[in-house]
Image: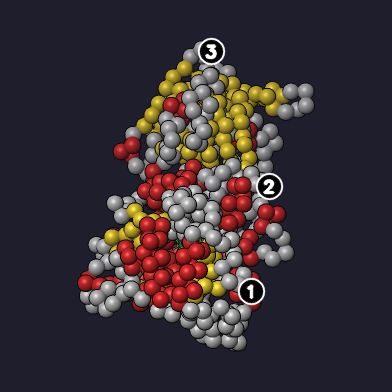
Amino acid sequence: MTQQTEGEAPEKKGLNFVEQIVADDLKAGKNGGRLNTRFPPEPNGYLHIGHAKAICMDFGVAEKFGGTCNLRFDDTNPVKEDVEYVDSIREDIHWLGFDWGNREYYASDYFPKLYDLAVRLIKEGKAYVDDQSSEEIARQKGTPTEPGQESPYRNRSVEENLDLFERMNAGEFDEGSRVLRAKIDMASPNMHFRDPIMYRIIKTPHHRTGDKWKVYPMYDFAHGQSDYFEGVTHSICTLEFEVHRPLYEYFVKELADESYCPRQIEFNRLNLTYTVMSKRKLLQLVKEGLVAGWDDPRMPTISGMRRRGFTPKSIRNFVDKIGYTKYEALNSVGLLEHAVREDLNAVSTRGMAVINPVKVVITNYPEGAEEMVEMENNPENPAEGTHSMPFSREIYIERDDFMENPPKKFFRLAPEGEVRLKGAYIIKCTGVKKDDNGNIEEIYCTYDPETRSGLPGSMRKVKGTLHWVSAKHAVDATVNMYDRLFNVENPSAETERDFRELLNPDSLKVVKGVKVEPFLAENAKPGAHFQFQRIGYFTPDTDSKEGVLIFNRTIALKDSWEKEQKKA
Ligand code: ATP
Ligand code: MG
């Protein structure tokens, strides 16, 4: 795998290679000029950003060429599947901005037809029941350079095979005691052709078909045929299926003719630095309580990213930037974060919040007085207008924005120094009050009434501008500061240590006693995007409610992506 270092992918001009294939097929009038794709998640976990890449492709290409895209739940393994996952998958695709209309299908809808096809293949001498264990079968597989060994059950009579397969499905045999295999070629150079397993016995009830079936089709025996039954013309998937393609075609040819035949096309997966994408590992993180759930904002899941405050647009832009190729790559999370900042800069509402507050008393401001100052909601979009923010004699600023003995280039507040309070006045520090341990409790300042924002005096030059909130109006909030979930760039490449040992212990810091301006508290609705001035982008957490304000930090303001690019 190579680190992907190309910067912004070219603006959408040409077609990507998949779109090119589709365009050519349409032009050649294949499948009667029809275009139908599908997105085929297995409902055994929540969707992640990798799935988003597949979704953008499957739905995107259909949209682009006036075709349709089916949502097909690939529910062939009841042991791992659940309706909770079905529901979350639907929600996440919609949130990304795609819709499958009434084309929601399930591989389990095709169980009867698949069973009939299996019976037909048995009758034609193309399938047989093998009484060996899967370990024995694996042992006889051979290697890419050595042919496999034929099963002793390979030449059973059609009658015996039919009888056994029927009884497998009736529940007469234990799980693992028998399988149905395709009778193809144990010497084929393609290992997938060495009598692949078509059906296995599973006795766990299925979330849709209950205990109707005791045999379940393998992926290779279900996917292509499901595509065919649905009228899918282009079955777009990730590169690991490339080696399965001949088998896909082998089974599909049992059904298709020249007038219509689905076609499989593969592209490279999305892999992201500082995270894992395997559903098995993500499930482990959830089950072992190493994260707070599938939608934990540190997870690479779509629901996690939504809760974190990522926008659908930023995810789609990111997928666009990385593009689709035939080469595996490791994509930088820095590029995803860059796309998130780009969109949030355009859409988020600005507000003031002080994360680590220290009180400032403005000694020459009349006690009990207060006034409102106007704050821009979004300088990127003046149409969003302004909101009012209260100013009074006592305010909070960030503790870090004051230094008693500042170094030379410190442009924030220091004794005898001046700073501008954003949107309000210029203040000058006149002293501090410390507790017995020498910690600063309060800072004393005077303000210059002539420098109110909007007055000519406000034009006076001072080096620093600070964010602040009025102490008596401020609302208390808790802020979840999220960082990368893993400490290493490519956790999946680590061979020495278990992936759970690579978790970043500082991936979540909960900060209480944050002071936010009233406007932020009033507008902390689910899905809102804010920029806390000078701090970063934040969104109300799903657990936030009236009286218990919780914000998630989506991302800090500073972008590391450009730096990363220069280094590369
Ligand atoms: P599993 O190991 O459970 O099969 P999976 O990640 O392949 O996991 P599926 O639900 O089978 O999950 O995936 C649905 C579709 O999403 C497939 O077409 C698959 O190719 C695609 N997909 C999965 N992971 C990625 C990824 N990282 N990048 C791009 N596409 C992906
Ligand atoms: Mg899969």
Q: In this view, does 406 lie above or below 343?
A: above
Label 3 vs 2, first from the N-terminus = 3
Locate residue 12: give its quadrant: bottom left
Image quadrant where one finds the N terminus: bottom right
Q: Do the residues labelled 3 and 2 touch (CB within 8 Å)?
A: no
Pair 3/1: label in front: 1
Nearest the eye: 208 or 389 = 208
Question: Which amino acid type is marked by label 2?
Answer: Pro
Distance from disc 3 to disc 2, alpha carbons, whole Å, reads 46 Å
Q: Does the residue labelled 2 lie within 8 Å of ligand 1?
A: no
Question: Which amino acid type is marked by label 1?
Answer: Glu
Q: Which mark is residue 136?
A: 1
Q: Where is residue 278 in the image (x, y as percent from the top left)?
A: 56, 59
Residue at horizontal 27%, vertical 78%? 258
Q: Which mark is residue 367?
A: 3
Q: Where is residue 78 in the image (x, y as percent from the top left)?
A: 50, 54
The answer, for residue 513, to whether it is visible in the render is yes
Question: Badge 3, how many Cα within 10 Å: few under 14, some, many 20+?
Answer: few
Q: Position of 16 compared to 278: left or right?
A: left
Question: Badge 1, how many Cα within 10 Å: few under 14, some, many 20+?
Answer: few
Residue at horizontal 25%, vertical 72%? 31
Question: Badge 2, how many Cα within 10 Å: few under 14, some, many 20+?
Answer: few
Pair 2/1: label in front: 1
Residue at horizontal 39%, vertical 43%? 347
